[in-house]
Image (tube, grey):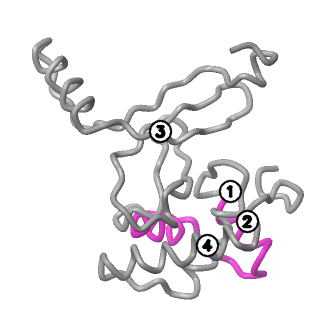
Amino acid sequence: MATSQAKRKASRRQLEAALAGAERLCRDSDIRLTSKRRRLLVSLVQATGPLSAYELAQAYRDENGEELPVMTVYRMLDVFMEAGVVHKLRSTNQYMPCSHIACDHPHARAQFLICDGCGLVREMDFAEKELRQLDRKARSSGFHLFRDQLELHGLCDTCQGGAS
């Protein structure tokens, strides 16, 4: 299961940096990082990959001995998305912490490479110029984009047997 303790990998230093970054991002967005939100974020940061709201509720229950209704998890995730703390992978309906959560400088909008073999997700930054060009091409084809988050699916090197 994605929530097992054996699959946790964030080091203490990475976790502390992520929590400090989340605290800053929440403060900048006038959002309180309550103790429950903080504990939910710890579960997400310590996961080895993206989690669904149901998996996150289970991880929270396992780690804190306390129920957190899935609807509450969704609301917390919405708050985190608003602050730029987490991303939602729409194609898989899963959430992951922003890979730049501990940085204190602005970043481009995140785009994702998703391995359909093992579920590995890599966050990539696209330059604003590239996204504008994509939007222009879509519009010239008579198509108007509502979202500009790209989720590109394929296989990672490991799932390809080490091939590049």
Element assignment for label 2: helix
Element assignment for label 4: helix
In the foreground, 82 or 125? 125
The alpha-carbon separation of the residues under discs 3 and 1 comes to 24 Å
Type of amino acid under label 1: Glu
Q: Residue drawn 36% across and 81% down?
A: 31
Query: Residue 78 vs residue 56: left or right?
Result: left
Q: How many marks?
A: 4
The alpha-carbon separation of the residues under discs 2 and 3 comes to 27 Å
Type of amino acid under label 3: Met
Q: Is residue 79 magenta?
A: yes
Q: Which residue position holds label 3?
A: 124
> Which label is found at residue 110?
none
Q: Residue drawn 48% across and 73% down?
A: 22
Residue 37: quarter of image: bottom right
Tell me which label, 2 or 3, sits earlier in the chain: 2
The alpha-carbon separation of the residues under discs 4 and 1 comes to 11 Å
Extent of the magenta region: 56-80
Q: Which residue position holds label 4?
A: 40
How far across and down, in percent of the image, does residue 161 sit? 81, 16
> Which label is found at residue 55?
1
Element assignment for label 3: strand
